[in-house]
Amino acid sequence: MRFIVNLLGGLILALALTGCATAPRPQVPFIPGATVETLAATVAISVKSPEGSTGGTGYLIYRRPDRFHLVMLTPFGTTALEFFASDDRVTLLLPAKGTAYVGSFADLPAKGGLQGWRMMQWVVEGDPLLRPGTTGTVERTDPAGRRIVATYGADGFLERKSSEEGEVLYRDYRSVDGVPFPTVIEFGDRAGTRVRITFDEPEVNRPVEEAALTPNLEGVTLLPLSSLKGA
């Protein structure tokens, strides 16, 4: 269970950052104003936190603004866990145990950075991926009153975003059907959690079925998410 807590802590902090990117070396022209509305991709993830380091591979399905389904695989290619998020609702499914933990983000343990979901909203909204002619820092205040600093490179692509809670770095832009997309995202929070996510073969802005974002809980034992706090 410690593996689950540590891994998910870093993942939650970073998964909704897919609308941003950095350090572009585009091979295909970018469409001005294009944004990431949906995403499906295989992922490799490494997480470092005060509790230790972990990592793994899997795949992610995402739909803006806050729906996602993350599957993490065992070294043998079977499903280790599935993580679903929708607004404030969280479901952690462990297929091998026939068990799911259900609750809100406030029910997640503080260890491993799991409470970092609250940072995601300021990362997703606001700053565009590409602002032609803009370089350096741009400051603004989000609806929650937090000061946000966005840094753009010489080519106008977003490279870094920070607030009082942490920062995100966007690396290795590529054009996916004209949409700017980072193949690498690195994230750190003030609690000492560091995350690196590498995306492979991303599919952007293609239809995502509702069933792909909804957990199948038939025949599964449901437990409160808050019970993970003692794991």
Image (tube, rainbow, N blue to C red):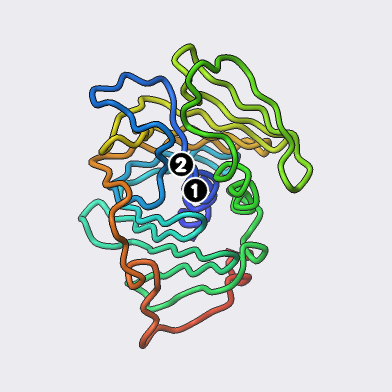
* Quadrant location, the C terminus: bottom right
**Residue 7, image x and y in percent?**
47, 50
Residue at 51% x, 28% y is: 169
> Vertical placement of 14 versus 216: above or below?
above
Q: How many marks?
A: 2
Q: Residue 1: give x, y in percent of width and height.
A: 48, 61
Q: Is residue 188 above or below residue 83?
A: above
- Crowding near pointer 2: few (<14 within 10 Å), some, many (20+)? many
Badge 1 marks a residue whose secondary structure is helix
| Residue 51 placement: quadrant | top right
User: Within 10 angstroms of label 1, few (less than 14), some, or many (20 or more) residues?
Assistant: many
Residue type marked 2: Gly
Disc 2 element: helix
Which residue: 63% across, 59% down? 109
Q: Nearer the viewer, residue 223 or 84?
A: 84
Residue found at the very far top of the displayed protein: 154
Q: From the image, state whether disc 2 or disc 1 is nearer to you.
A: 2
Q: In the visual, does 155 lie left or right of 41?
A: right
On residue 16, the disc is 1
Q: Nearer the viewer, residue 76 or 149?
A: 149
Name the residue carrying label 2.
19
Q: Are marks 2 and 1 in contact (CB under 8 Å)?
A: yes
Kind of residue at badge 1? Ala
- Residue 28 to residue 81: above or below: above
User: Which image quadrant for residue 199?
Assistant: top left
Task: Examine the rendered structure and indicate whether residue 179 appears above or below residue 130.
Answer: below
